[in-house]
Image (cartoon, helix red, strand yellow):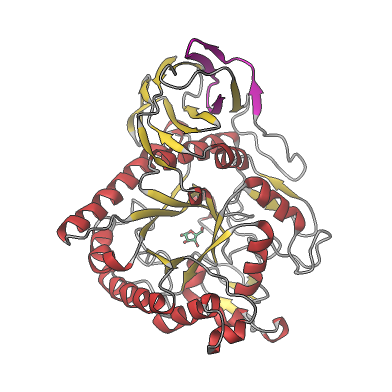
């Protein structure tokens, strides 16, 4: 297989907003309890947070974490999670049929966020609650002092900038599920009240829970038709998995993410035109990942437990390559997608795994995410690509190469995926439009066993490797992308 690519700094898509590399902590399964928080753990800090998890979160480099849900938020009373811990009620969380002790609430989350150096993105409950609970939470978090809720908080305000107006309100599984019209009215009035408390906040309206939702498209049109001037972003959620043995389709699922983003952009711009709005709306892809939903189909009748093991997917090399490809898709849309949250951060379809009382380790998917977060900073460039294609059952004809480039003063970085399961690909890159280059490094995630995974016993079975194959000569680069691989080529 041979592909060619031309990179030119003039082919500019947009600047990477670092929040594109966000993550998500939900009160679900073991994400919070025994994931980030475990007071009895040998590494626990004075607030009960695991230092081993915190170290991996810093290494992952995520700058933003969405909290506290997810489906959980649609039944959540945030007031249960403030004040003395011993006085907090234990509630039945209906989203996951779990016991919620409220030992972690907004104050503890903010302590953790500051410790690990992430910006919070807060969701309000528009399922069972509404305007009053939402505006009180903004007051609690962002007003300095002198009001009921801010004085209950004490200390300096949290200054939380980005707020989600509910979660997946289009989904029949959501507590307090609404029609588009019902949600649009509530979202608009809640947005107005929240902004009256703090005019500096940014707001995200719920878009569709997935491109496959029957209301996708009309939901966005109705919701944005009502809320366009009151919000800054519309959300997208997308989860991908391999179906049966159709790995070729799975490896090409980023084409589905591309189409989803393009369709939401088109819908938002249609509403902009119809409403004669001046501002442009941006996208918040605030839940995305590989999630083998079919493996967990039987988990709906849960025993009521505290911190049960829920959807703890173990990710393979193939999954890691797909995660890297989904990040390429997000980067390719950096002009419109400003926020992205990989769901989730710890234990629940996560990049980081932990055992209660035991170790924390990196899943295979941790690696493309951490490397893209670290090196994918600057201006995204659209490469001109010629590549072989093949036919897939779910996505039709797709290119075997997917790639994007990110350019900054530090150099140019190419992120590329070879979707062929069997054949390496020679990639020839024309870089003559870039300032003279003298070094090229090639980091790859690929393995003789594409199903290899990391476990507590073998936490480093899957790691990135450096190859010494790049040939750089007179502004032309040649590298070989192994079969079924994610690649990062750094040029300077
Ligand atoms: O991330 C897991 C769940 O997936 C979230 O709670 C929900 O928003 C989505 O359906």
Q: Position of residue 164 (x, y in %)?
A: 43, 66
Residue at image location 54% in from the left, 89% down from the top: 148
Whether residue 105 is visible, yes or no, is: no
Residue at image location 44% in from the left, 80% down from the top: 135
Of 244 and 288, the residue lying toward us: 288
Quarter occupied by residue 256? top left
Whether residue 350 is visible, yes or no, is: yes
Q: Is residue 108 above or below residue 355?
A: below
Q: Is residue 292 above or below residue 385?
A: below
Q: Position of residue 273 (x, y in %)?
A: 17, 55
Q: Position of residue 9 (x, y in %)?
A: 40, 28
Q: Is residue 150 above or below residue 235?
A: below
Residue extending farthest top: 473
From the image, which quarter does the C terminus lie in? top right
Residue extending farthest right: 42
Of 313 and 66, the residue lying toward us: 66
Number of marks present in the image shown? 0
Q: Does the magenta segment cover residue 466?
A: yes
Q: Position of residue 37 (x, y in %)?
A: 71, 64
Quarter occupied by residue 456? top right
Residue at image location 42% in from the left, 51% down from the top: 338
Residue at image location 54% in from the left, 28% down from the top: 487
From the image, which quarter does the N terminus lie in? top left
Q: Does the magenta segment cover residue 482?
A: yes
* Numbered range of the magenta stretch: 465-492
In the displayed structure, does residue 450 sit left or right of residue 203?
Answer: right
In the displayed structure, does residue 458 sit left or right of residue 149?
Answer: right
In the displayed structure, does residue 137 sit left or right of residue 228?
Answer: right
Of 204 and 98, the residue lying toward us: 204
Q: Is residue 61 above or below residue 489?
A: below
């Amino acid at each position: 297989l041979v592909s060619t690519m031309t990179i030119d700094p003039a082919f500019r898509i947009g600047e990477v907003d670092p929040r594109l590399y966000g993550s998500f902590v939900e009160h679900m399964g073991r994400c919070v309890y025994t994931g980030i928080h475990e007071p009895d753990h040998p590494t626990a800090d004075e607030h009960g947070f695991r230092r081993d998890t915190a170290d991996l979160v810093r290494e992952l480099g995520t700058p933003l974490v969405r909290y506290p849900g997810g489906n959980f938020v649609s039944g959540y009373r945030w007031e249960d999670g403030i004040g003395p811990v011993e006085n907090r009620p234990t509630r039945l969380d209906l989203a996951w049929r779990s016991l919620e002790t409220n030992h972690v609430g907004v104050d503890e989350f903010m302590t953790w966020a500051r410790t690990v150096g992430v910006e919070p993105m807060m969701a309000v409950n528009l399922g069972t609650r509404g305007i009053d609970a939402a505006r009180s939470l903004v007051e609690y978090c962002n007003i300095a002092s002198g009001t009921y809720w801010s004085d209950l908080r004490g200390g300096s305000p949290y200054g939380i900038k980005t707020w989600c107006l509910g979660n997946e309100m289009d989904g029949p599984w959501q507590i307090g599920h609404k029609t588009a019209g019902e949600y649009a009215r509530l979202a608009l009035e809640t947005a107005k009240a929240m902004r009256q408390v703090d005019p500096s906040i940014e707001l995200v309206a719920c878009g569709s829970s997935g491109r496959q939702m029957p209301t996708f498209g009309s939901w966005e049109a109705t919701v944005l038709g009502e809320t366009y001037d009151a919000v800054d972003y519309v959300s997208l959620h997308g989860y991908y998995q391999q179906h049966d043995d159709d790995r070729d389709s799975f490896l090409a699922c980023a084409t589905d993410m591309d189409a989803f983003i393009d369709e939401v952009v088109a819908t938002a711009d249609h509403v902009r035109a119809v409403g004669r709005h001046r501002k442009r709306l941006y996208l918040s892809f605030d839940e995305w990942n590989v999630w083998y939903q079919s493996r967990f189909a039987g988990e709906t009748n849960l025993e009521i437990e505290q911190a049960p093991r829920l959807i703890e997917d173990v990710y393979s090399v193939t999954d890691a390559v797909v995660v890297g490809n989904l990040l390429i898709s997000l980067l390719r849309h950096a002009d419109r997608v400003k926020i992205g949250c990989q769901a989730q951060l710890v234990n629940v379809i996560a990049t980081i795994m932990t055992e209660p009382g035991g170790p924390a380790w990196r899943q295979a998917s941790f690696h493309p995410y951490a490397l893209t977060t670290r090196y994918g900073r600057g201006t995204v460039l659209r490469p001109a690509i010629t590549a072989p294609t093949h036919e897939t059952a779910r996505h039709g004809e797709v290119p075997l190469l997917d790639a994007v480039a990110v350019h900054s003063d530090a150099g140019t970085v190419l992120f590329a995926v070879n979707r062929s399961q069997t054949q390496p690909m020679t990639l020839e890159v024309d870089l003559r439009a870039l300032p003279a280059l003298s070094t090229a490094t090639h980091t790859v995630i690929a393995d003789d066993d594409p199903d290899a995974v990391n476990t507590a016993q073998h936490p480093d079975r899957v790691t990135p490797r450096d190859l010494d194959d790049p040939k750089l000569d007179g502004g032309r680069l040649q590298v070989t992308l192994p079969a079924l691989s994610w690649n990062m080529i750094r040029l300077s």
